Image: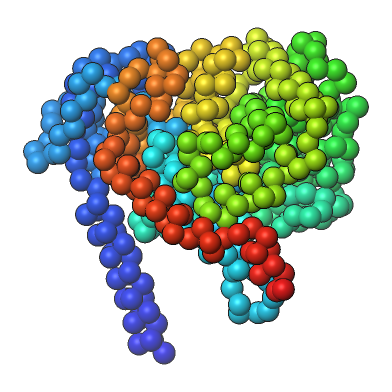
Amino acid sequence: MKSLKLLTLIAFISLGLNAQSKAESENDTYVVKNVNIIPMTTNNEVIENATVVVEGQKILSINKPIPNNAKIIDGKGKWLIPGLIDMHVHNLADGPYTSYPTRGPAIHIDTQNLFTLYVANGVTTVFELSARAEHIGQRNEVIRGDVIGPRIALAGLIDGGNANMTATTPSDGRQTVRLAKGEGYEFIKVYSQLNQETYKAIIDEAEKQNMKVVGHIPSAFEGKTEEAFVPHFGLVAHAEEFSKQADHFTDEEAERFAKMSKKNGTWLIPNLSNLVYIAKQARSLDSVRNLESFKYVHPLMQSKWIVSNQYNEGTSAKRIAYFDKLVDFHIKIVKAFKKEGVPMVAGTDAGTSGIVWGFSLHDELKLLTEAGLTNEEVLASATRLAAEWLEIDDKIGTIETGKFADLILLDKNPLDNISNTKEISGVFVNGKWIDKNKIDTMLSDVEQWNNANKENYNWHEVLKKIRGE
């Protein structure tokens, strides 16, 4: 028995060393020379013509001597910013599990194909707001080095029904929080159908378990929104949560919500792109078909977004006008929250119809500038502030010595025009350098796979398969 345990331990250590060797072999020393650094620290003073050394996973030095045998990257005329953070995503993963024991998932997802979309857009950290076990598995793929992809923070979603984790009483809510922590989720997301007592119990238990809370304002609080703003409710997932609670879409209502959030210390993910793209789809599905990034979307989602689009089905002029009012009100909310000094972080609801992983964050940043934030404020929302809310600002979110090398090399200055975040020359993902040529190749591989497999992913046929028909 002792020999068996010893062999098992040796095998485990060997696997660990192999993984470590793999990671070390892929993380060389790089030097970005003559680059303009936008550090996104609080004072954010641009460092011109700088030398940045990346060794292994981290930023080794700024404007210090260059190590021998370092690989040189010419940064002349270019701009270095921290990797971007999308604070609201829904990643595709294997599933669902149906039919009979041992069958496994009905649909398999290639994690690299999905995460390539983040890498290509410089999105190096994401916040998964509907996490399940498969997302933990995806994160492990990235950590092992099997997949090049973003850091993933995980929020377990709890609702009053029709969710992986449900709770309808305060005691159930508390137990569900404890179970979520045991499963490995780091955050809790509260959802729309929770009753008031259970919602409050979940948030209270989450604080006891040292888990921050993000989420919706449940429908049960309509007409009494203030009562939802209890201590430790830390982040509202959409501006839409306020429009659902609003009596009128006025500046005064937006200001009321801003003051409410400020008083409770609750931050906001405006998620402007969500309703903007919903309104577009309500008008025409061409808004989806004509997306430049549509070719990179998994063929199952391509099919679903066209043949089963919930925003386009049964659409009407009245419905479109309502969506347009929501879009306008959400801009008022952003202006009011800025005036009141409530921190806002960038998120997109990536994975919902028309919102393409990675690409959507650049759309969101542009919408935030159009809503009244400065380019610097917008960049902060997707870097330093997002890292601060996730409580990993000692590791990412700014360009400083000792932090992880999640960086984007841009051809143009995003402080001049926020759309320049799309002018990507290359990306460091956890210290691994991926230049524009490699990015283009990776995207081309995704497009080719999607085209070759379209016939296998008709949405209605897949649903029949899942149901066992």
Q: Residue at x 21, y 25 (%)?
A: 75
Q: Quadrant of the N terminus?
A: bottom left
Indicate the position of residue 342 as horizontal and vertical percent values: 64, 18
Relative to 91, does residue 339 appear above or below in the rendering?
A: above
Residue at the extreme bottom of the image, as rendered: 1
Q: Find residue 106 and report its horizontal and vertical position in percent.
A: 60, 68
Instruction: Write the residue at 47% across / 15% down.
Output: 375
Snapshot quadrant of residue 99 = bottom right
Q: Nearer the viewer, residue 100 or 223?
A: 100
Up the image or down, 68 lies above or below 320; here it is below
Q: Residue at x 57, y 60 (%)?
A: 457
Farthest residue, direction right: 223
Instruction: Name the quarter where the C terminus is drawn.
Output: bottom right
Q: Residue at x 79, y 55 (%)?
A: 162
Q: Residue 334 vs residue 64: left or right?
A: right
Name the image quarter holding residue 187.
top right
The reply, left or right, for residue 197 in relation to residue 409 is: right
